[in-house]
């Protein structure tokens, strides 16, 4: 049984983690009012490019599901919890300090005070996601600030994803120490997110679990094209990147081959949106028909299954 957030969700990697996630979700749900299906859900994101990726297709998914949605954003590329807090702290000490107005000339307090927000999200930046020491005390300070401004808002943390298996470097797991593989990045970042979410009593968007569910299954995992010669590549030639959830190899505006193993491509953004949809609206995304044009129908179906499994514990919904 999954308890309600207005969303409900549960992480699905081992029964103990499922129970932990249900517990965390329930701890928020008990305090939250239930929105009618026709009410607009007001969602505010404190994040970076990974929150932008994960919500890229959320408006289309929410619209199809009949859920009015308004999104507010305080996002900066690569921004860590520490940096978000330092920006907020500068504005709290001096509302006129330019350092505190990093979000298009606004402070976090100004943006959060613009009306009522039902759900506010936070996340760590990906390069620090595997090092639990980088979350504290900044996650709690941000949560406390949000609660002081929006006491009725539910706060949710996005569990971000591991980089592609052929990335040149993975997340930090300790001071100047880095994960050796995508699997270790997923394991260490997952542990960090669950530790902090448990301490704060807030639920997670298990996007990282959904990515790894696809990437760890031989039937769906991206496999590097070892026959592609990167050094002699010429536009528009690209390696086979079937089932990649990350941008990977692409040509930039100068028609030079570029590589991005970190950010989500259309399929990854779609998967992130499916997970967020399932958690926010407590509905399996399986029946949704929307999919980005560049995501093949058969692969999209597998992404919906993955999103369902990590948010509903593998259980079928009626």
Image (tube, rainbow, N blue to C red):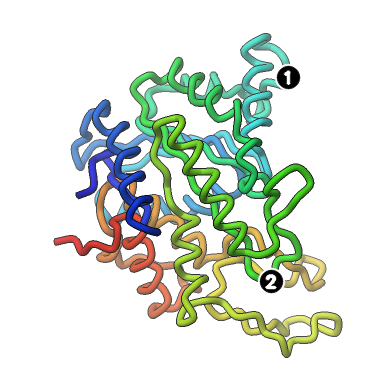
Q: Are marks 1 and 2 in contact (CB under 8 Å)?
A: no
- State the separation of the CA atoms marked 1 and 2: 40 Å
- Outermost residue on the top side: it is 94
Which element is circle 1 on? helix
How many neighbours does mark 1 have within 10 angstroms: few (below 14), some (14-19), or many (20 or more)? some
- Outermost residue on the front side: it is 16
Task: Please state which of the two labelled residues, at mark 1 or mark 2, is closer to the viewer.
Answer: 2
Residue 287's image quarter?
bottom left
Position in image of residue 192 (x %, y %): 55, 44
- Outermost residue on the left side: it is 318
Query: Depth check: 101 or 92 in front?
Result: 92
First in sequence: mark 1 or mark 2? 1
How many neighbours does mark 2 have within 10 angstroms: few (below 14), some (14-19), or many (20 or more)? some
Which element is circle 2 on? loop
Residue 47, compared with residue 53, is above or below; it is: above
- Outermost residue on the right side: it is 231
Residue 261, compared with residue 61, is above or below; it is: below
Residue 186, compared with residue 243, is above or below; it is: above
Q: Is 124 on the left or on the right of 297, as rendered?
A: right
Which numbered circle lies on residue 166? 2
- Residue lying at 35% horizontally and 31% vertically, measured from the top left: 118
Residue 203's image quarter?
top left
Query: Depth check: 115 or 182 in front?
Result: 182
Residue 25's image quarter?
top left
- Residue lying at 68% horizontally and 31% vertically, measured from the top left: 83
- Residue lying at 79% horizontally and 46% vertically, measured from the top left: 176
Position in image of residue 212 (x %, y %): 50, 64
Which numbered circle lies on residue 98? 1
Position in image of residue 200 (x %, y %): 45, 30
């Amino acid at each position: 049984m999954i308890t309600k957030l207005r969303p409900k969700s549960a992480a699905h990697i081992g029964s103990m983690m499922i129970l932990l996630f249900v517990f965390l979700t329930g701890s928020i749900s008990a305090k939250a009012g239930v929105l009618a299906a026709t009410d607009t859900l007001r969602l505010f994101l404190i994040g970076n490019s990974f929150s932008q990726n994960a919500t890229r297709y959320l408006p289309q998914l929410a619209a199809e599901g009949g859920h009015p949605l308004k999104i507010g954003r305080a996002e900066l590329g690569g921004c860590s919890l520490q940096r978000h807090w330092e920006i907020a702290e500068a504005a709290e000490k001096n509302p006129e300090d330019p350092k505190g107005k990093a979000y298009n000339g606004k402070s976090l307090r100004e943006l959060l005070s613009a009306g009522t927000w039902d759900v506010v999200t936070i996340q760590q930046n990906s390069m620090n996601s595997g090092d639990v020491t980088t979350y504290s005390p900044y996650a709690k300070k941000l949560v406390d600030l949000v609660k002081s401004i929006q006491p009725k808002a539910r706060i949710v943390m996005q569990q971000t994803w591991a980089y592609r298996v052929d990335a040149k470097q993975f997340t930090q797991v300790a001071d100047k120490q880095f994960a050796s593989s995508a699997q270790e990045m997923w394991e260490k970042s997952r542990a960090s997110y669950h530790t902090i979410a448990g301490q704060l009593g807030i639920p997670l968007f298990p996007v990282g679990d959904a990515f790894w569910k696809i990437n760890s299954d031989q039937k769906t995992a991206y496999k590097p094209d070892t026959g592609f010669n990167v050094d002699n590549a010429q536009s528009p030639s690209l390696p086979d990147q079937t089932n990649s959830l990350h941008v990977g190899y692409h040509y930039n505006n100068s028609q030079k081959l570029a590589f991005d193993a970190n950010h989500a491509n259309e399929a990854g953004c779609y998967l992130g949106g499916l997970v967020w949809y399932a958690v926010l609206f407590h509905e399996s995304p399986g029946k949704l028909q929307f999919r980005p044009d560049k995501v093949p129908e058969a692969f999209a179906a597998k992404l919906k299954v993955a999103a369902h499994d990590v948010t509903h514990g593998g259980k079928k919904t009626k």
